[in-house]
Image: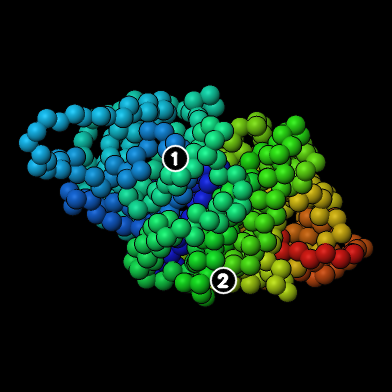
Amino acid sequence: MAGGAREVLTLQLGHFAGFVGAHWWNQQDAALGRATDAKESPGELCPDVLYRTGRTLHGQDTYTPRLILMDLKGSLSSLKEEGGLYRDKQLDAAIAWCGKLTTHKEELCPKNPYLQDFLSAEGVLSSDGVWRVKSIPNGKGSPPLTTATTPKPLIPTEASIRVWSDFLRVHLHPRSICMIQKYNHDGEAGRLEAFGQGESVLKEPKYQEELEDRLHFYVEECDYLQGFQILCDLHDGFSGVGAKAAELLQDEYSGRGIMTWGLLPGPYHRGEAQRNIYRLLNTAFGLVHLTAHSSLVCPLSLGGSLGLRPEPPVNFPYLHYDATLPFHCSAILATALDTVTVPYRLCSSPVSMVHLADMLSFCGKKVVTAGATIPFPLAPGQSLPDSLMQFGGATPWTPLSACGEPSGTRCFAQSVVLRGVDRACHTSHEVSFFPSAADSLQGGSSLPPPLLKLQSTGYGSGWFPQGSSGEHPSVWGTVFLFVPVPDPGSLGQRPHQTRLAALGQLHGCWSGAR
């Protein structure tokens, strides 16, 4: 890989993980497309961490996610399991039989209207409407396939989205998709419902060998593999699949980081008693076993609780969404993931997966919680410190781990990432005790006391200016703040914003009275 990238291999396990992953990869591909169209560097984020280079049978360079995903039979819709990127349509299998032939052809699933403009198997739609081969960030790539223009892409509607492949606009490598054919995605029969069922899947030689082969394929081409990130459903049998996969990774690749994101859809219904029992048991078993084999585990859900008693979904002050739609919930979680994973995806950061996990874990407790502010409320002409002061003693982020109120807990360490705010907004025009240079905060360096106090509001201590009464912020643990250089291009509508701003954080906590 060019530039000494510290590669990460992503595993997506489960259907809701597929929803989150589809949004995640669409976001990565959009950022990559903006950078290649503008012939600029994609900023401080290194795309080679998540992507790999390849070449098709026609000799054209490709740039595809370093990804292994597992899902159930019937979950792909119009997406082909082998993909269309490397397939040579001119080659037909030789038929030696000279007798009568009968052809049985399976009816193809109709493609979602959102994907109708996604025509080329080896090209991408550039901003000027021209289909081109995906360029690689270091300047390599092939000339345009065609100059034929295509209508403006449609915006997906909630009613048109049935499965995650209905809105995935990224070409995958043939080794990415691994289907579990013994269980069904649709219907009431043959479902993967229990943790034990998921564990038994990867105990079967067929599926275990298939996963190992794909792992070896991706890992052996890496120059410096820093680790694996697992996006895993917790509410169904895929919690068992994830636990077994994490155990396999720990056994074969000891010393590498394993960051596990346990995913759960939105709120559930009290009337489905048996399904709720399964959900609770799967989540509990999944968290226990994943923690044993991962460097760090973080549950992610917009539901208010992981228990049997349903709670209202979390509320975002500046964001309207339908918590019953996986399409909406997964988009928010993917946006949060894209922010909180920044530390180990930076081009020039000393923080790797293993280092981040070590910073956030405490005495073997490897379960952390997450929160985010999406979008970050920065008024026109307002500085970042002034905007944060408006929160007062309230938390500046919305919890995303469905673990309830964090009262009675203490924070051992925090990783805080701020994206999408121009440096001109980092300096306060009204409050003199804020530092004037945010440059010193990049790369996870130590924070000045005022900003350290600012990040301590998540557990009710309030925000205290220097000279005010209250606990010194050092009792709340270490804070690692990452402020990457804003991405090129202008997506935000306000001055000094280069994209819709987001603030994400991970908390490593322990129980105890304050």
Question: What residue is at 68 percent from the left and 39 percent from the top?
Answer: 275
Q: Give the alpha-carbon distance from disc 1 to disc 2, as whole Å.
A: 35 Å
Q: Secondary structure at mark 1?
A: strand
In the drawing, what numbered circle is on residue 191? Answer: none
Tell me which numbered mark, 1 or 2, is placed earlier along the sequence. 1
Please state the horizontal and vertical placement of residue 296, each as a whole percent of the image.
Answer: 62, 64
Residue toward you, 2 or 509: 509
Q: Visible in this render: residue 444?
A: no
- On screen, residue 351 versus residue 268, left or right, reads left
- On screen, residue 151 versus residue 242, left or right, reads left
Compared with residue 13, is residue 362 higher up or lower down, i.e. above or below? Answer: below
Q: Residue furthest right?
A: 469
- Of tags 1 and 2, which is closer to the observer? 1
In the figure, residue 418 lies in which quadrant? bottom right
Q: Amino acid at mark 2?
A: Val
Question: What residue is at 70 percent from the left and 54 percent from the top?
Answer: 284
Mark 1 lies on residue = 73
Question: What residue is at 37 percent from the left and 71 percent from the top?
Answer: 223
Please state the horizontal and vertical placement of residue 344, each as a whole percent of the image.
Answer: 53, 64
